[in-house]
Amino acid sequence: MSSFFDNIRRVTPYVPGEQPEGKVIKLNTNENPYPPAPAVGEILAATDADLLKKYPEADIGSLVRELSKTYGVKPSQVFVGVGSDDVIGMIFLSCFAGEKPIAFPDITYSFYDVWAELFRVPYRTIPLKEDYTIDVNDYDGDWGGVIIANPNAPTSIELPISDVEELVKRHPECIVVIDEAYVDFGGTSAMPLIEKYPNLLVTQTFSKSRSLAGMRIGFAVGNEAVIKAINDVKYSYNSYTLNRTAITAGVASLSDPEYFKKTCERVIRTREAARAELSKLGFSCPESKTNFLFATHESIPAEYIQKELKKRDIYVRYWNKPRINNRLRITIGTDEEMAALYAALKEIIASCR
């Protein structure tokens, strides 16, 4: 006998990092340890709550215009959504609608295969090299789309911009998405290439470098016709995506480029110091262009370290997945938080001798 459950779609969902409450050191979800630009707090404090009874701008025009000024593109080349997750989800719906499979790495942002399954987009994963790098030659083929996180997550490794351009150039028949969630921490953006390659889409987020993970703001930049197609899908799905408060905060964040630059530099300095400190403790990490390190210890299993750190109220990310099940993703915190991490690791390592 059939059941109404037969008509319910079942998917294996994306599993986000833990969001513990209370006084903990949270180095597991790649948030920025520093507050957003001061102008964000000022503008939010001055916001008239009475405005919230009205719908926000459907076209998110004020933020789109500010992004176009910041990145030197036309407003018609910018799409804004509820975090880069929403932006990439709309791209999957609008740009990966053909019958050919799309391609992305086997070790990357673990939402890609979830979207593919959810939206019934055929896909194939391309194995990273043993050193976790991407070889663009491995992507030769006839694809319905390609998506690469650059720098990649959770590996922290950047694909050189020359290789990114080569990938886009080799696949004019499909949209190539470069997901740049972490590019502001030392990476090189592919955004200057959008005028040269109409099949290129570049996505970024306010969650990491702009310290606005709680506001959920993401955007894509690309060819005007492609951006229009994504907007058409958005308006067919949810016209009013970004709320008034988020739009206002996003505009305020872009108004202080000096603060943005200093915060990114601060994270980078702490990251490089952390890589050196972890090396002294027996860890190795690839060179990172992100706000996290992808670490493995010479003798102690990653899962054990993660559990022991959690007992000490320090959270880092661990995946029990092939090829990465002996690695930890450690978000860069403040210098004080990182010092507490080193002290805890020394204690754990000493207990294993």
Image: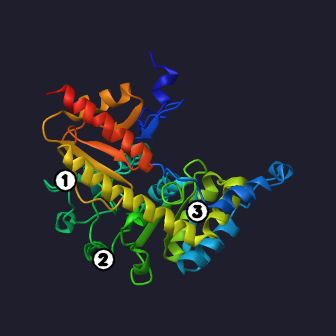
Residue 165 numbered mark, or none: 2
Q: SS class of the residue under badge 3? A: strand
Q: Quadrant of residue 291?
A: bottom left
Are the residues tagged 2 and 3 within 8 Å (C-beta)? no
For the residue pair 273 and 177, the one nearer the viewer reads as: 273
* Quadrant of the snapshot with the N terminus: top left
Q: Which residue shows up at 54% across the image and 50% down it? A: 213
Disc with the residue nearer the chain's start (2 vs 1) = 1
Residue corresponding to mark 3: 80
Residue corresponding to mark 1: 127
- The amino acid type found where label 2 is placed reads Glu
Q: Which residue shows up at 39% across the image and 74% down it? A: 190
Residues under labels 2 and 3: Cα distance?
A: 24 Å
Residue 155 numbered mark, or none: none
Within 10 angstroms of label 1, few (less than 14), some, or many (20 or more) residues?
A: some
Vertical placement of residue 169 versus 347, above or below: below
Q: In which quarter of the image is residue 338?
A: top left
Q: Which residue shows up at 29% across the image and 64% down it? A: 158
In the image, is 341 to the left or to the right of 19?
Answer: left
Disc with the residue nearer the chain's start (2 vs 3) = 3
Vertical placement of residue 38 versus 327, above or below: below
In the image, is 14 to the left or to the right of 228?
Answer: left
Most distant residue in the bottom direction: 196
For the residue pair 342 and 298, the one nearer the viewer reads as: 342
Q: Is residue 196 among the parts visible in the rendering?
A: yes
Are the residues tagged 2 and 1 within 8 Å (C-beta)? no
Q: Position of residue 163 (x, y in %)?
A: 25, 73
Q: Which residue shows up at 40% across the image and 41% down it? A: 28
